[in-house]
Image: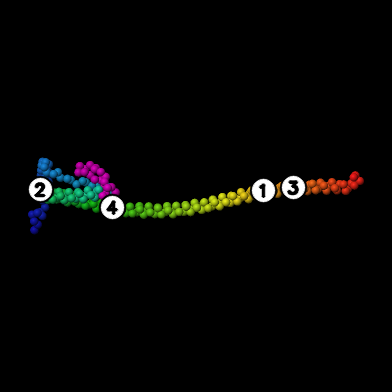
Amino acid sequence: MPSKEDTPTPLAQVEASTQETSTSLSLDSNSPQEQVPPRVEVFNSSCMIYTPSWEVYEESSLEEVSRLLVEALALSKSRKERFGKSLSSTCVADADAMFKHIAQIGDLYYHLNKAQEYHISQILALEAKLKKSKEAKEKNFQAMCVASKHNQENLQEITKLKKENQEFQTSHKNEVNEIQASRKSEVKKLCVLHKEELNPWKS
Protein backbone atom coordinates (compact mmCIF):
# COMPACT_ATOMS: atom_id res chain seq x y z
CA MET A 1 0.00 0.00 0.00
CA PRO A 2 1.50 3.35 -0.98
CA SER A 3 1.90 5.76 1.89
CA LYS A 4 0.31 9.18 1.99
CA GLU A 5 3.62 10.78 1.08
CA ASP A 6 3.92 8.65 -2.08
CA THR A 7 0.44 9.63 -3.33
CA PRO A 8 0.78 11.87 -6.46
CA THR A 9 -0.35 15.44 -5.97
CA PRO A 10 -3.24 16.48 -8.28
CA LEU A 11 -2.32 18.92 -11.06
CA ALA A 12 -4.76 21.57 -9.80
CA GLN A 13 -3.35 21.30 -6.29
CA VAL A 14 0.18 21.62 -7.71
CA GLU A 15 -0.74 24.75 -9.68
CA ALA A 16 -2.59 26.27 -6.68
CA SER A 17 0.28 25.46 -4.36
CA THR A 18 2.77 26.88 -6.85
CA GLN A 19 0.74 30.08 -7.25
CA GLU A 20 0.32 30.41 -3.48
CA THR A 21 4.01 29.85 -2.88
CA SER A 22 4.99 32.36 -5.55
CA THR A 23 2.59 34.95 -4.08
CA SER A 24 3.89 34.46 -0.57
CA LEU A 25 7.46 34.83 -1.82
CA SER A 26 6.65 38.07 -3.60
CA LEU A 27 4.83 39.53 -0.59
CA ASP A 28 7.38 38.52 2.00
CA SER A 29 10.24 40.97 1.64
CA ASN A 30 12.30 39.20 4.28
CA SER A 31 12.31 35.84 2.47
CA PRO A 32 15.27 35.26 0.12
CA GLN A 33 14.46 35.52 -3.58
CA GLU A 34 14.56 32.15 -5.38
CA GLN A 35 17.39 31.73 -7.91
CA VAL A 36 16.36 30.26 -11.24
CA PRO A 37 18.88 28.12 -13.13
CA PRO A 38 20.10 29.61 -16.41
CA ARG A 39 18.88 28.10 -19.65
CA VAL A 40 21.53 26.48 -21.82
CA GLU A 41 21.34 25.98 -25.57
CA VAL A 42 23.92 23.86 -27.41
CA PHE A 43 24.67 24.76 -31.02
CA ASN A 44 27.15 22.40 -32.68
CA SER A 45 30.48 23.30 -31.09
CA SER A 46 29.38 26.32 -28.99
CA CYS A 47 27.07 26.77 -26.02
CA MET A 48 24.86 29.79 -25.43
CA ILE A 49 23.82 30.50 -21.81
CA TYR A 50 20.48 32.31 -21.36
CA THR A 51 19.22 34.18 -18.33
CA PRO A 52 15.75 33.37 -16.92
CA SER A 53 14.40 36.31 -18.96
CA TRP A 54 15.46 34.38 -22.12
CA GLU A 55 17.98 37.02 -23.14
CA VAL A 56 21.44 36.02 -24.30
CA TYR A 57 23.91 36.38 -21.46
CA GLU A 58 27.15 35.35 -23.10
CA GLU A 59 28.79 32.68 -25.21
CA SER A 60 30.88 30.70 -22.79
CA SER A 61 33.47 27.97 -22.96
CA LEU A 62 32.55 24.37 -22.30
CA GLU A 63 34.25 24.48 -18.90
CA GLU A 64 32.13 27.47 -17.88
CA VAL A 65 28.97 25.78 -19.14
CA SER A 66 29.76 22.63 -17.16
CA ARG A 67 30.27 24.67 -14.01
CA LEU A 68 26.97 26.51 -14.50
CA LEU A 69 25.15 23.24 -15.16
CA VAL A 70 26.43 21.80 -11.91
CA GLU A 71 25.24 24.93 -10.11
CA ALA A 72 21.87 24.66 -11.86
CA LEU A 73 21.47 21.07 -10.69
CA ALA A 74 22.27 22.15 -7.15
CA LEU A 75 19.67 24.93 -7.40
CA SER A 76 17.07 22.49 -8.70
CA LYS A 77 17.71 20.10 -5.80
CA SER A 78 17.55 22.91 -3.25
CA ARG A 79 14.31 24.19 -4.77
CA LYS A 80 12.79 20.71 -4.60
CA GLU A 81 13.76 20.38 -0.93
CA ARG A 82 12.50 23.87 -0.14
CA PHE A 83 9.08 23.83 -1.78
CA GLY A 84 8.35 20.13 -1.43
CA LYS A 85 6.33 17.97 -3.77
CA SER A 86 4.36 20.85 -5.26
CA LEU A 87 7.36 21.57 -7.52
CA SER A 88 8.70 18.03 -7.80
CA SER A 89 7.65 17.62 -11.44
CA THR A 90 9.39 20.91 -12.37
CA CYS A 91 12.55 19.86 -10.57
CA VAL A 92 12.55 16.49 -12.32
CA ALA A 93 12.10 18.21 -15.69
CA ASP A 94 14.93 20.63 -14.90
CA ALA A 95 17.18 17.80 -13.81
CA ASP A 96 16.40 15.79 -16.94
CA ALA A 97 17.09 18.80 -19.14
CA MET A 98 20.35 19.52 -17.34
CA PHE A 99 21.53 15.92 -17.56
CA LYS A 100 20.65 15.98 -21.26
CA HIS A 101 22.78 19.09 -21.74
CA ILE A 102 25.59 17.51 -19.74
CA ALA A 103 25.44 14.48 -22.06
CA GLN A 104 25.50 16.80 -25.07
CA ILE A 105 28.50 18.63 -23.65
CA GLY A 106 30.19 15.30 -23.03
CA ASP A 107 29.64 14.43 -26.68
CA LEU A 108 31.05 17.81 -27.65
CA TYR A 109 34.11 17.20 -25.50
CA TYR A 110 34.57 13.80 -27.14
CA HIS A 111 34.28 15.17 -30.68
CA LEU A 112 36.48 18.15 -29.86
CA ASN A 113 39.15 15.84 -28.44
CA LYS A 114 38.94 13.62 -31.53
CA ALA A 115 39.16 16.67 -33.79
CA GLN A 116 42.11 17.94 -31.77
CA GLU A 117 43.88 14.58 -32.07
CA TYR A 118 43.19 14.53 -35.81
CA HIS A 119 44.49 18.07 -36.30
CA ILE A 120 47.56 17.34 -34.18
CA SER A 121 48.30 14.25 -36.29
CA GLN A 122 47.84 16.33 -39.45
CA ILE A 123 50.17 19.02 -38.10
CA LEU A 124 52.81 16.42 -37.16
CA ALA A 125 52.52 14.86 -40.63
CA LEU A 126 52.91 18.29 -42.24
CA GLU A 127 55.90 19.07 -40.02
CA ALA A 128 57.55 15.78 -41.03
CA LYS A 129 56.81 16.51 -44.67
CA LEU A 130 58.20 20.04 -44.38
CA LYS A 131 61.29 18.67 -42.63
CA LYS A 132 61.91 16.20 -45.47
CA SER A 133 61.30 18.92 -48.04
CA LYS A 134 63.71 21.23 -46.21
CA GLU A 135 66.38 18.51 -46.07
CA ALA A 136 65.91 17.80 -49.80
CA LYS A 137 66.20 21.53 -50.57
CA GLU A 138 69.36 21.78 -48.50
CA LYS A 139 70.87 18.81 -50.34
CA ASN A 140 69.93 20.34 -53.69
CA PHE A 141 71.41 23.67 -52.61
CA GLN A 142 74.65 21.99 -51.55
CA ALA A 143 74.78 20.13 -54.88
CA MET A 144 74.18 23.41 -56.71
CA CYS A 145 76.99 25.04 -54.71
CA VAL A 146 79.37 22.20 -55.63
CA ALA A 147 78.32 22.38 -59.28
CA SER A 148 78.73 26.16 -59.25
CA LYS A 149 82.19 25.78 -57.75
CA HIS A 150 83.10 23.24 -60.45
CA ASN A 151 81.73 25.55 -63.12
CA GLN A 152 83.79 28.41 -61.71
CA GLU A 153 86.90 26.23 -61.75
CA ASN A 154 86.14 25.12 -65.31
CA LEU A 155 85.62 28.73 -66.35
CA GLN A 156 88.95 29.70 -64.84
CA GLU A 157 90.62 26.77 -66.62
CA ILE A 158 89.00 27.78 -69.92
CA THR A 159 90.16 31.39 -69.44
CA LYS A 160 93.68 30.15 -68.70
CA LEU A 161 93.70 27.94 -71.83
CA LYS A 162 92.43 30.82 -73.97
CA LYS A 163 95.19 33.05 -72.65
CA GLU A 164 97.84 30.39 -73.31
CA ASN A 165 96.44 29.80 -76.79
CA GLN A 166 96.50 33.52 -77.48
CA GLU A 167 100.11 33.75 -76.31
CA PHE A 168 101.04 30.70 -78.39
CA GLN A 169 99.39 32.11 -81.50
CA THR A 170 101.15 35.44 -81.02
CA SER A 171 104.51 33.75 -80.47
CA HIS A 172 103.98 31.40 -83.42
CA LYS A 173 103.00 34.28 -85.66
CA ASN A 174 106.13 36.18 -84.73
CA GLU A 175 108.27 33.11 -85.46
CA VAL A 176 106.56 32.61 -88.80
CA ASN A 177 107.14 36.24 -89.74
CA GLU A 178 110.80 35.97 -88.79
CA ILE A 179 111.21 32.75 -90.82
CA GLN A 180 109.44 34.25 -93.80
CA ALA A 181 111.61 37.40 -93.63
CA SER A 182 114.75 35.28 -93.35
CA ARG A 183 113.76 33.12 -96.33
CA LYS A 184 112.94 36.17 -98.42
CA SER A 185 116.34 37.63 -97.62
CA GLU A 186 118.08 34.34 -98.56
CA VAL A 187 116.08 34.04 -101.77
CA LYS A 188 117.00 37.57 -102.69
CA LYS A 189 120.68 36.88 -102.05
CA LEU A 190 120.49 33.68 -104.10
CA CYS A 191 118.86 35.50 -106.96
CA VAL A 192 121.57 38.15 -107.00
CA LEU A 193 124.28 35.52 -106.85
CA HIS A 194 122.67 33.44 -109.58
CA LYS A 195 122.32 36.48 -111.75
CA GLU A 196 126.01 37.25 -111.41
CA GLU A 197 126.90 33.68 -112.28
CA LEU A 198 124.78 33.85 -115.45
CA ASN A 199 126.38 37.09 -116.57
CA PRO A 200 130.09 36.93 -115.56
CA TRP A 201 131.19 39.26 -118.37
CA LYS A 202 129.26 42.17 -116.85
CA SER A 203 131.52 42.22 -113.88
Label 2: state its secondary structure. helix
Which residue occupies 35% across, 53% down? 120
Residue 63, image x, y percentages: 26, 49
**Which residue carries the number 3 mark?**
178
- Residue 133: numbered disc: none
Q: Which residues are magenta?
A: 45-63
37 or 129, nearer to the observer: 129
**Which residue carries the number 4 mark?**
109
> Looking at the image, can residue 42 be seen?
no
> Looking at the image, can residue 14 be seen?
yes
Question: What's the distance in space between the residues labelled 1 and 4, CA to CA?
Answer: 85 Å
Which residue occupies 80% across, 48% down? 186
What is the residue that sits farthest to the bottom in this orientation? 1
For badge 1, the amino acid type reads: Glu
Q: Categorize mark 2 by other alpha carbons within 10 Å: few (<14), some (14-19), many (20+).
A: few
Q: Nearer the viewer, mark 2 or mark 1?
A: 1
Q: Categorize mark 3 by other alpha carbons within 10 Å: few (<14), some (14-19), many (20+).
A: few
For badge 2, the amino acid type reads: Gln
Which residue occupies 71% across, 47% down? 174
Task: Tell which circle, 2 or 1, labels the residue nearer the N-terminal end.
Answer: 2
Q: In the image, is residue 56 part of the stretch drawn in magenta?
A: yes
For badge 3, the amino acid type reads: Glu
Task: Tell which circle, 1 or 4, labels the residue nearer the N-terminal end.
Answer: 4
Q: Quadrant of residue 27?
A: top left
90 or 139, nearer to the observer: 139
Question: What's the distance in space between the residues labelled 3 and 1, CA to CA?
Answer: 17 Å
Question: What's the distance in space between the residues labelled 2 and 1, CA to CA?
Answer: 126 Å
Q: In the image, is residue 189 part of the stretch drawn in magenta?
A: no
For the residues bearing labels 3 and 4, Cβ distance under 8 angstroms: no
Task: Tell which circle, 2 or 3, labels the residue nearer the N-terminal end.
Answer: 2
**Which residue carries the number 2 mark?**
13
